[in-house]
Image (cartoon, rainbow, N blue to C red):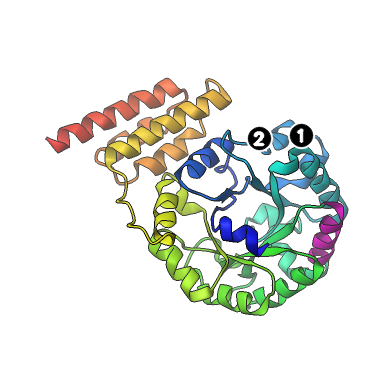
Amino acid sequence: MYDFFRNHQVILGPMAGVGDEVFRFLCLEAGADLTYTEMISAQGLAYDNERTFRLLDLAPNETRVAVQLFGHDPEVLAREAARVEEELSDHLAYIDINMGCPVRKIIKKGEGSALMKDPDTAFDIVKSVSRAITHPVTVKFRRGVVQGQESAVDFGLRMQEAGASACAVHGRYAAQMYHGIADWGCIERVKEALEIPVIGNGDIKSAHDALSMIEQTSCDAVMVARAARGNPWVFTQIKAALSGEDVPEPPSAKERVAMARRHAHLLAAREGTHIVRMRKHAMWYMAGLPGASAVRRELDECDTVEDFDKVFGKLEEEIDARSL
């Protein structure tokens, strides 16, 4: 997959409850080379859950997408990966298996990062899925599970042996959740040990961070996740830096409000009248803006696109007043 990542070097990572097709649309528009779906339950697909299947919906500008599945049963994951491949056909970039999620409700089922403690089952999952589909299979995992006990290199080697075509490594232990600092040295060690491509993940918040990670680790691609929330412009900045161009200035306050308004309207077109999930996106767009703290409670009570428009209008008036 080295050729693939040469053309898809800047990636939007999977984020549960965030990475729907509207969010992915805006990130692709801003310069992301590839996006991941939210992590999708293989068991949910097996139950023909309509809400789960909707996570496979493509953005209008999405020619290819990486689909991330999670589960613990090799047979179920293989069968549902084959269904996803049939459903998406050439729109599928690859199937990624989540072996890094640190959330308790996932771990207690033996899924996500719990699979790093059960490398034999993880091996069987990758082997089974690889045999069931023609598209590549990748794995996303962490530095290790228990803080201070790094296992990423050994785990990566097992996944490579099982048939993984690439892996994404997050430089934190599962026990850290999203706290502390990601250790990029771990990514470097995995890259040195494996023959397959390695995607670096963790604490990429700017163009400078992306360049620094590539320089330090020699990773084949960089994955941005939380830093893209309320900030799709991060992809524009990273792409410019990788091309040797001047990095654009951060968006103005008015540009951020305008993007939040657009996001709300796109979400309403997708979901209808009630767009409660826009509340968190609005908070991310508004963070640090003049007058944002004064309307935080109002944003938290918004339900419809009209509600959000009213609050965004107030913010624009506040920005105009402060610029006089």
Amino acid type, mark 1 = Asn
Q: Is residue 302 magenta?
A: no
Q: Which secondary structure dominates the residues rendered in magenta?
A: helix
- Percent position of residue 261, x then y: 39, 30
- Asked whether, in this view, residue 155 is left or right of residue 30, the answer is right
Q: Judge the density around disc 2: few (<14), some (14-19), many (≥20) Cα neighbours within 10 Å.
A: some
Q: Nearer the viewer, mark 2 or mark 1?
A: 2
Q: Residue furthest left?
A: 324
Do residues under tags 2 and 1 come within 8 Å of each other at their CB atoms?
no
Residue 151 in sight in this render: no
Q: Is residue 271 above or below residue 12?
A: above
Q: Secondary structure at mark 2?
A: loop
Q: Which mark is residue 57?
A: 2
Q: Which mark is residue 49?
A: 1
Residue 208 lies in quadrant: bottom left
Q: Which residues are magenta?
A: 121-133
Amino acid type, mark 2 = Asp
Residue under the image location 51 percent in, 73 percent down: 184
